[in-house]
Image (spheres, rainbow, N blue to C red):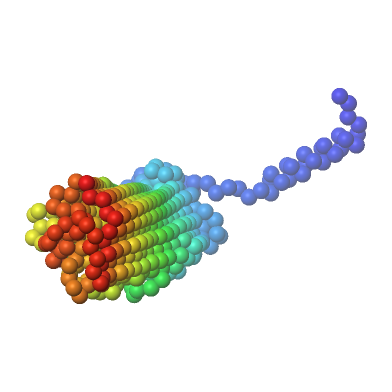
């Protein structure tokens, strides 16, 4: 092949442009070097050096990339536009005592990813920190692929903040793994949480109102209730006073109390969660809420599968649909609250299309004394319960319709009237039973 001078000049000019472009292109951020004064694995406190680097990178709006190594630090303050990345499990910030390890206040556009916070099980001053990472009044945050471990308080604490908390691993914390209060557009997704002493994920508000946090795809296991109580601890996910929260696609197991607990949480959705080995109610909507959708979940092993309760406190309005619930046990060591129920509801509720198997007490429990209003239970399959469906017999209760259910192997009657938890009277599944407030028909008891 031959080249004329014009073609050769054009090719040479093009190479010159490429060379100039390469020289002008800004250098990609790399690990912090020795010239910065940072000394990995030295055993010396690195707080002052790291704080200077954090401030400089935030001012330049560049990423601070930490090299592999172990860095002893006290509290580091994050800035607006701080972006800090590490080398995964090879980059460890090790607590040397004091408050939170990382604190951000009014730090919008914060990005943290790919390093470890090790609390070292050292005491943290509770008046200065609630967790290893504390973020306050910050929007558009991204906390991704961090590992947090061995905290004598919590893991990630968020206050009036929003953004994404995703892909993090949190283990061995002495309180809650993730705790959000008064969120402003928050997603908590795809995190792995284990061995939290009190709770997995908390979504709370300081007063009842709109929240809208999305909690999805998390793996949560081994949650204790070290601080005691009757349900405020021991939960995989707890939503308190926060409205319109979506809890979906989570895998939750081995919690001292509940997989998902909504307390005064209106319009909560618990959809397509997998829940196993719970010490109390698996899926709970309680106290002053209006609206709960509990659908397409799997529960295997709990004292009650689903409870929608506290009509006396204003708790009402629910759909419980398409859930698979089995192996409900009685807690015989409990003085009063033994349970063993598949689904329990009280007011303005539809219970339909659920499959319940092996309930030690009731497959479905409707009402509690006079606290019952406008409930329908239709097209459910109940197998191997002591009583298939129990419905309050209090004449002050409201209306109920129980139709087209299949009840197999109920040992103490397919459908029974109750005085609180005690069955009485004949089996209502035999023949048609109508009263001014009750319709029971077309149920199959075998």
Q: Which quadrant is home to the N terminus?
A: top right
Q: Position of residue 358 (x, y in %)?
A: 20, 47
Q: Quadrant of residue 75?
A: bottom left
Is residue 52 shown to the viewer in this render?
no
**Residue at left 82%, top 37%?**
11
> Which residue sits furthest front?
431
Left or right position of 139 against 428 = right
Q: Position of residue 244 (x, y in %)?
A: 40, 66
Q: Position of residue 199 (x, y in %)?
A: 27, 57
Q: Position of residue 50 (x, y in %)?
A: 42, 55
Foreground: 434 or 97?
434
Q: Quadrant of residue 16?
A: top right
Front-most of residues 383 and 167? 383
Q: Is residue 259 above or below residue 30?
A: below
Q: What residue is rendered at 18% in x and 49% in y?
A: 410
In the picture, measured across the screen, residue 361 lies left or right of residue 406, that is left
Residue 411 visible: yes
Residue depicted at x 88% and y 35%: 7
Would you identify the image quadrant in which residue 335 lies? bottom left
Residue at (40%, 60%) from the top-left corner?
246
């Amino acid at each position: 092949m031959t080249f004329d001078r014009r073609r050769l000049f054009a090719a040479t000019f093009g190479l010159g442009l490429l060379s100039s472009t390469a020289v002008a292109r800004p250098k990609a951020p790399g690990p912090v070097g020795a010239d910065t004064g940072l000394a990995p694995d030295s055993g010396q406190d690195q707080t002052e050096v790291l704080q200077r680097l954090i401030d400089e990178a935030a001012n330049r709006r560049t990423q601070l990339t930490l090299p592999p190594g172990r860095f002893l630090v006290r509290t580091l303050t994050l800035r607006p536009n701080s972006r800090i990345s590490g080398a995964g499990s090879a980059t460890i910030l090790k607590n040397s005592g004091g408050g939170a390890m990382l604190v951000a206040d009014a730090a919008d556009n914060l990005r943290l990813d790919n390093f470890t916070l090790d609390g070292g099980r050292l005491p943290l001053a509770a008046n200065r920190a609630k967790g290893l990472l504390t973020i306050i009044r910050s929007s558009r945050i991204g906390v991704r692929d961090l590992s947090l471990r061995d905290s004598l308080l919590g893991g990630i604490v968020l206050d009036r903040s929003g953004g994404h908390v995703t892909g993090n691993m949190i283990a061995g914390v002495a309180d809650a793994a993730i705790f959000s209060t008064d969120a402003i557009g928050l997603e908590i997704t795809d995190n792995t949480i284990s061995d939290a002493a009190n709770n997995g994920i908390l979504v709370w508000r300081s007063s009842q109102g709109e929240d809208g946090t999305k909690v999805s795809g998390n793996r949560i296991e081994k949650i204790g209730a070290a601080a005691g109580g009757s349900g405020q601890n021991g939960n995989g996910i707890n939503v308190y006073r926060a409205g319109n929260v979506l809890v979906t696609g989570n895998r939750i197991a081995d919690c001292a109390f509940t997989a998902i607990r909504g307390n005064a949480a209106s319009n909560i959705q618990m959809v397509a969660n997998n829940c196993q080995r719970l010490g109390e109610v698996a899926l709970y909507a309680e106290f002053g809420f209006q609206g709960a959708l509990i659908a397409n979940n799997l529960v295997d092993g709990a004292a009650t599968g689903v409870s929608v309760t506290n009509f006396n406190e204003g708790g009402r309005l629910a759909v419980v649909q398409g859930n698979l619930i089995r192996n409900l046990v009685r807690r015989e060591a409990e003085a009063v609250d033994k349970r063993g129920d598949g689904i329990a509801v009280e007011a303005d509720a539809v219970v339909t299309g659920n499959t319940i198997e092996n309930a030690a007490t009731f497959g479905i429990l409707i009402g509690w004394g006079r606290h019952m209003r406008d409930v329908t239970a239709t097209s459910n399959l109940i197998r191997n319960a002591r009583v298939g469906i129990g419905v309050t017999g209090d004449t002050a209760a409201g209306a109920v319709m129980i139709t087209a259910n299949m009840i197999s192997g109920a040992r103490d009657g397919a459908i029974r009237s109750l005085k609180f938890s005690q069955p009485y009277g004949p089996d209502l599944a035999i023949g048609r039973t109508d009263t001014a407030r009750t319709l029971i028909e077309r149920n199959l008891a075998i």
